[in-house]
């Protein structure tokens, strides 16, 4: 009987998957209110976590499906197995990309001149902007240094940190494409040896690329901790923690994809369907992902990493004329906002006088 790569996490079995599927369904459902709060709250809202937002919603769907399938007798269909392989394989890629963008904000912020020449006075910063009005160094972003400390601008460092994260973005795109193709065709083409080999190669490319990136994030963060005193150490601690969690998932996937089976529902060694295999899957693949998502939503990452609404998404620094135009536009918005507040207050005062 021909052999083929065992699906990561195995197929859904009533005896092994029902309880953990319910546990993680509840766990991910608990993240949704926190996620919605972060989206609604102006102080913590940021577009950096679009990938993680989609990941949490998708995991709820995944574990709903696994719970339903495992509650019934019989094996899941090939189509369901393919869907699960795609979504299980792509989940930690989305989180890793968001974490990489956090690293970009942290590193870029550490290279700006302090105090910022274009920073607004504290009284002009609204509460919604207090958690980082732009992806640049705000007035209080260097708590470890004395307030009178002056730090020089480092535009060259800033340029290369941006190119480093841009390079990881390209690798993430390659990982998504190869992972989607390899995982989506794994089951349906399992009896074709040549196609199975190609799909396995694509799966490995996808996983190993993200694993390399997460290892690089750990190395850069640890290096920054000891060699870059301008980096905020609190945000750096979160970065190391999140990157290590994602490394655990990547290492597990690299190991799990090497297992071979002759039947999807087999419970022989290497099938990833044994109780030990299932336990390992939930502990080293699913749990680190949940912990990473819970950390991103459980703390005010916009404030900790000073990302602003959209993080650092510039290809280059602003030219002096562009900076002047931006500051002028911000001043005009502030003046219009104040004028609207004054008109509203005056209108309410007139109404009160009229009906008194």
Image: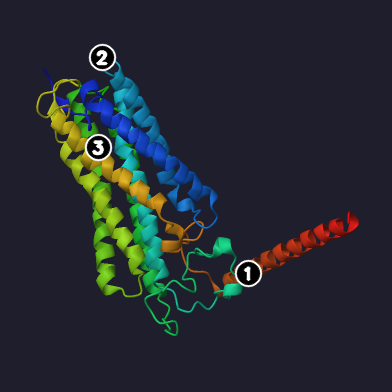
Q: Residue at x 57, y 71 (%)?
A: 323
Q: Quadrant of residue 332?
A: bottom right
Q: Does label 2 or label 3 sit earlier along the sequence? A: 2
Q: Nearer the viewer, mark 1 or mark 2?
A: 2
On the rendered structure, is 214 left or right of 37?
left
Label 2 with label 3: CB-CB less than 8 Å:
no
Residue in the foreground of this view, choosing between 146 and 229: 146
Quarter of the image with the N terminus is: top left
Label 2: few (<14), some or many (≥20) within 10 Å? few
On the rendered structure, is 217 left or right of 327?
left
Q: Does label 1 or label 2 sit earlier along the sequence? A: 2
Quarter of the image with the C terminus is: bottom right
The residue at which mark 2 appears reads as 74
Label 1 with label 2: CB-CB less than 8 Å:
no
The residue at which mark 3 appears reads as 203
Q: Nearer the viewer, mark 2 or mark 3?
A: 2
Q: Residue at x 55, y 55 (%)?
A: 42
On the rendered structure, is 153 left or right of 69?
right
Residue 209 visible to an observer of this rendering? yes
The residue at which mark 1 appears reads as 325
Residue 9 percent across, percent down from the top left? 23, 32
User: Seen from this angle, which residue lies furthest top?
Assistant: 73
Q: Is residue 85 above or below residue 131?
A: above
Q: Quadrant of residue 259?
A: top left
Q: Label 3 to label 1, Cα distance in Å?
A: 47 Å
């Amino acid at each position: 009987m021909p052999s083929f790569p065992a699906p990561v996490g195995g197929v859904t079995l009533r005896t092994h998957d029902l309880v953990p599927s319910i546990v993680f369904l509840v766990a991910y459902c608990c993240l949704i209110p926190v996620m919605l709060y972060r989206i609604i709250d102006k102080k913590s809202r940021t577009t950096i976590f679009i990938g993680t937002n989609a990941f949490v919603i998708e995991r709820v769907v995944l574990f709903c499906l696994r719970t339903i399938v495992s509650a019934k007798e019989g094996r899941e269909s090939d189509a369901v197995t393919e869907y699960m392989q795609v979504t299980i394989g792509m989940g930690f890629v989305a989180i890793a990309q968001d974490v990489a963008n956090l690293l970009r904000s942290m590193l870029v912020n550490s290279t700006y001149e302090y105090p910022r020449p274009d920073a607004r006075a504290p009284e002009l910063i609204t509460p919604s902007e207090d958690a980082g009005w732009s992806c640049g160094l705000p007035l209080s972003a260097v708590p470890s240094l004395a307030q009178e400390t002056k730090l020089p601008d480092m535009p060259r460092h800033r340029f290369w940190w941006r190119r480093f994260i841009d390079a990881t973005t390209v690798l993430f795109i390659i990982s998504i494409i190869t992972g989607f193709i390899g995982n989506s065709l794994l089951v349906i083409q399992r009896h074709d040896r040549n196609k199975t080999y190609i799909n396995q190669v694509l799966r490995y490319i996808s996983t190993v690329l993200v694993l390399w990136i997460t290892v690089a994030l750990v190395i850069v963060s640890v290096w920054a901790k000891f060699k870059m005193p301008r980096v905020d150490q609190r945000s750096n601690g979160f970065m190391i923690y999140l990157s290590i969690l994602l490394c655990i998932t990547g290492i597990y996937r690299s190991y799990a994809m090497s297992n071979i089976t002759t039947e999807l529902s087999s419970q022989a060694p290497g099938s990833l369907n044994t109780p030990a295999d299932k336990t390992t899957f939930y502990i080293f693949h699913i749990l680190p992902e949940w912990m990473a998502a819970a950390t991103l939503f459980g703390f005010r990452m916009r404030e900790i990493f000073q990302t602003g609404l959209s993080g650092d998404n510039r290809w280059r620094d602003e030219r002096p004329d562009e900076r002047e135009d931006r500051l002028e536009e911000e001043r005009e918005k502030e003046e219009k906002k104040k004028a609207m507040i004054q008109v509203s207050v005056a209108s309410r005062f007139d109404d009160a006088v009229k009906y008194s």
